[in-house]
Image: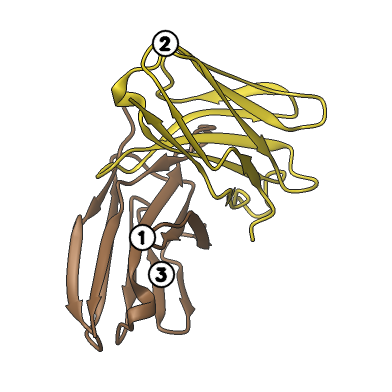
Chain colours: A brown, B yellow
Amino acid sequence: GQQVMQIPQYQHVQEGEDFTTYCNSSTTLSNIQWYKQRPGGHPVFLIQLVKSGEVKKQKRLTFQFGEAKKNSSLHITATQTTDVGTYFCAGYAGNNRKLIWGLGTSLAVNP
Amino acid sequence: DSGVTQTPKHLITATGQRVTLRCSPRSGDLSVYWYQQSLDQGLQFLIQYYNGEERAKGNILERFSAQQFPDLHSELNLSSLELGDSALYFCASSGPTGLGGGRNEQFFGPGTRLTVL
């Protein structure tokens, strides 16, 4: 079936270091969404990418959608302790009505 | 505050029992989604309703069922509970399909933590 793989599963960084999580799909995605879940909280929508090769920035966060629309990445520059949480990617494959979720990358930041 | 409400916040019950989880979507949202999140597991999509009708089904067990009512609130019924059903259950809602090929983002409620003893 359709799968979205996310790596790494866990990442531990020192505050100020950069962080990247990658999302790879077995099929072409019509769009991809990124969510962040803080410890003890619920997932919160960050961004959606739709176009092939699209790059979007939110302050220190940079999101990319691959040219083939099968992969995506989230890069955080100079991490802060407020970046702690689990980052999920999720995408729709074609006209499929189900949003397929990655397992998430848990980020820990040492102050 | 996402605007999605879920009750109860916590639920403790015994194996074999049946429980009902309740969700009220954001005002104006027609779609409701249910997810299960266990320890060390990602979000498992269970089921989606749109304006009262089932729209998409995920890994929902036969012991589980859901419905969306005319006022758009939704209930998730879990029966013959097992220890492995202990998890955080999230409800999310979204508006109509977005423009430009996108789909509207999902807004999650605070979740119901179910503990089966």
Look at label 3 and name its amino acid: Phe
Q: Nearer the viewer, mark 1 or mark 3?
A: 1
Look at label 1 and name its amino acid: Tyr
Lateral position of residue A71 relative to residue B35, left or right: left
Q: Secondary structure at mark 2?
A: loop
The reply to whether callout 1 and callout 3 are in contact (CB within 8 Å) is no
Q: In the rendered view of the protein, which quadrant contains the C terminus of chain A?
A: bottom left
Q: Residue at x 41, y 65 (%)?
A: A53
Residue marked by disc 3: A63
In space, the residues marked 2 and 3 are separated at their CA atoms by: 43 Å
In the image, is residue A21 above or below residue B74? below
Point out residue B106 in the picture as x, y percentages from the top left corner. 58, 49
Residue marked by disc 1: A87
Point out residue A19 in the picture as x, y percentages from the top left corner. 25, 75
Nearest the viewer among B49 and B108 is B108
Q: Secondary structure at mark 1?
A: strand
Pinpoint the chain carrying mark 1: A
Lateral position of residue B30 relative to residue A38, left or right: right
Residues indicated by labels 2 and 3 sit on the same polypeptide chain: no
Q: In the rendered view of the protein, which quadrant contains the N terminus of chain A?
A: top left
Pinpoint the chain carrying mark 3: A
Q: Secondary structure at mark 3?
A: strand
Residue marked by disc 2: B80
In space, the residues marked 1 and 3 are separated at their CA atoms by: 12 Å
Circle 1 residues within 10 Å: few <14, some 14–19, many ≥20? many
Point out residue B87 in the picture as x, y percentages from the top left corner. 37, 35
